[in-house]
């Protein structure tokens, strides 16, 4: 189950890109977080604690191995099974990608052990927001080129589906939505429609709650998670084990040509105006700006030195 700490991590990583993409829509950051939690939270909440790059975490956000088991049972949409997929143009190439994705993800998520044991099993859902392989027929390059591994691309597909949900509910002209209204849109996102008589009890049922109920719960939880507390200007030290990327702007969508090693001292000059989770830094102490780093992997230099001095020498 996704926790508030997991949501805080997700917001810190993807807030800048998400908020930029939401301009002109009635959606907000917490709504998108709720979709991410429901679709692949059980994956990225685990992977974020491993020593993996963010790009690798994104690439491993795949799932759904359910095949057709008869009329009304199991998967009904294309591709119902391996045979249906490989029969399509480039189907074998797609199967190879989907199978490898399953194997790679299952190495970290034990619940997929049985699926991996069956050589015909493969993933049907791709990306943080799980674009379904049924769209392979109309947009094969998205899957074959593995564009779902890029956050901006998987988010764009998510927003496209959410807009279709808005249309189904007659919300196209809305500039904002209540949390309950968004849960209804999310149900349409998941199922293709919304039945008012069923309320939130629609969509995938996990044995305890329906998709709509889970979305509403995650949305309410996300509303309670604050991130991006501003750092006071001053001296800090990098505490990321694998180093911290120096970027040209406040977000992971900005390029990086340098990684600052753990223990690197720097000066935080100011927090970004729009996203205080990112700070502008001076590496040389000469008052000139060198770029942006993610504030969550910085610690006050004085505290860091004190912590090191308190460690006893080996006997």
Image (cartoon, helix red, strand yellow):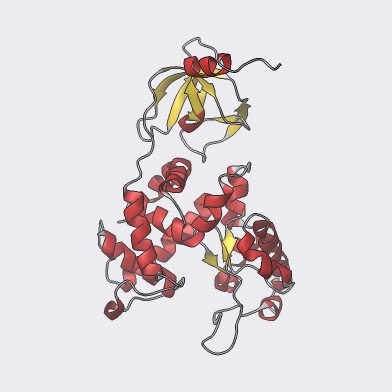
State how many labels appear: 0
Looking at the picture, how far across and down is residue 66, in whole percent? Answer: 59, 75
Vertical side of 73 occupied by 61: above or below: above
Image side of residue 197 versus residue 161, left or right: left
Looking at the picture, how far across and down is residue 79, in whole percent? Answer: 61, 77
Evaluate whether residue 141 shows in this view. no
Front-lying residue, 48 or 81: 48
Q: Give me the residue at 36% from left, 68% from top.
A: 212
Q: Give me the residue at 66% from left, 80% from top.
A: 84
Evaluate whether residue 108 shows in this view. yes
Image side of residue 226 versus residue 123, left or right: left
Quarter of the figure with residue 226: top left
Front-lying residue, 289 or 177: 177
Front-lying residue, 79 or 202: 202
Q: Give me the residue at 38% from left, 62% from top.
A: 215
Quadrant (top left, top right, bottom left, bottom right) of the C terminus: top right
Q: Give me the residue at 71% from left, 76% from top.
A: 86
Quarter of the figure with residue 194: bottom left
Vertical side of 287 occupied by 109: above or below: below
Vertical side of 313 occupied by 59: above or below: below
Q: Residue furthest front?
A: 315
Q: Residue furthest top?
A: 286
Looking at the picture, how far across and down is residue 280, in whole percent? Answer: 45, 24
Looking at the picture, how far across and down is residue 16, in whole percent? Answer: 42, 41
Front-lying residue, 73 or 286: 73
Quarter of the figure with residue 166: bottom left
């Amino acid at each position: 189950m996704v926790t508030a700490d997991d949501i805080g991590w997700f917001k810190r990583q993807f807030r800048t890109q998400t908020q930029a993409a939401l301009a002109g829509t009635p959606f907000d950051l917490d709504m998108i977080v709720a979709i991410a939690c429901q679709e692949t939270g059980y994956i990225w909440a685990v992977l974020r604690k491993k020593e993996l790059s963010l790009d690798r975490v994104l690439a491993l956000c795949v799932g759904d191995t359910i095949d057709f088991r008869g009329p009304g049972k199991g998967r009904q949409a294309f591709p119902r099974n391996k045979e249906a997929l490989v029969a399509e143009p480039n189907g074998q190439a797609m199967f190879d990608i989907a199978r490898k994705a399953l194997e790679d993800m299952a190495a970290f998520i034990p619940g997929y052990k049985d699926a991996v044991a069956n050589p015909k099993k493969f993933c049907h859902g791709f990306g943080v927001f799980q674009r379904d392989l049924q769209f392979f027929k109309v947009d094969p390059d998205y899957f074959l080129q593995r564009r779902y591994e890029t956050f901006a691309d998987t988010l764009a597909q998510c927003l496209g589906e959410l807009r279709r949900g808005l249309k189904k509910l007659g919300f196209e002209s809305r500039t904002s939505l209540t949390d309950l209204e968004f849960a209804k849109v999310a149900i349409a996102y998941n199922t293709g429609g919304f039945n008012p008589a069923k309320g939130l009890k629609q969509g995938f049922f996990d044995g305890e709650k329906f998709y709509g109920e889970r979305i509403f719960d995650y949305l309410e939880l996300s509303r309670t998670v604050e991130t991006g507390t501003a750092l006071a200007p001053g001296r800090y030290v990098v505490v990321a084990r694998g180093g911290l990327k120096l970027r040209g702007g406040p977000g992971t969508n900005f390029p990086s040509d340098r990684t600052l090693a753990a223990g690197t001292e720097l000066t935080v000059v100011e927090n970004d105006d729009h996203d205080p989770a990112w700070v502008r830094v001076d590496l040389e102490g000469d008052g000139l700006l060198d770029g942006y780093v993610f504030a969550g992997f910085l610690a006050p230099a004085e505290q860091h030195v004190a912590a090191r001095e308190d460690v006893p020498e080996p006997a």
